[in-house]
Image (cartoon, helix red, strand yellow):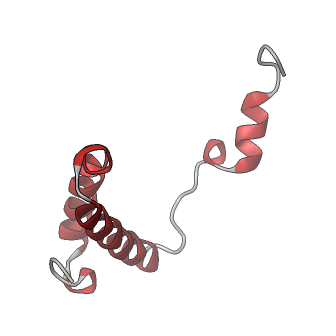
Amino acid sequence: MTGVDPSRLDDQQLMKELETIHRTRHDTLLYASNDALRAHNERMAQLEGEYLRRNPRRLVSAGRTREGARERGCGEPGE
């Protein structure tokens, strides 16, 4: 594994790691080698998994659910 085990990070460190990995995601997808992309995917999954483990009752915006997306689609041209 590359990097510190996410379970050993405090909440602030975990958020910083998540912000960094999400910020670099697009460039990694477009320009990195397959091995680098695979490592990025694995690390992102580890960090996100730890975040979800710590925050099982996190706030979920209604607009970010399937039902909310359907509601946004109502009344739009072509619907």
Identify the image quadrant of the N terminus: bottom left
Q: Quadrant of residue 18?
A: bottom left
* Image point (23%, 63%), residue name: 36
As drawn, which residue projects farthest toward the front? 34
Against 71, residue 66 (above or below) is below
Residue 49: give x, y in percent of width and height. Answer: 42, 75
- Residue at image coords 32%, 68%: 38
Residue 57 vertical position relative to residue 32 in the rendered view, above or below: below
Q: Quadrant of residue 11?
A: bottom left
The location of residue 64, given as percent across then percent down, is: 61, 46
Looking at the image, is 60 positioned above or below residue 57?
A: above
Q: Quadrant of the C terminus?
A: top right
Q: Quadrant of residue 13?
A: bottom left
Q: Nearer the viewer, residue 7 or 41?
A: 41
Residue 12 position, x and y percent, is 20, 66
Between residues 56 and 7, which one lies in front from this camera angle? 7
How far from the left and from the top, in percent, is residue 21?
Answer: 25, 57
- In the rendered image, the vertical position of residue 19 relative to residue 13, given as above or below: above
Q: Residue at x 25, y 54 (%)?
A: 19
For this orientation, the residue located farthest to the top is 77
Give the total of numbered labels. 0
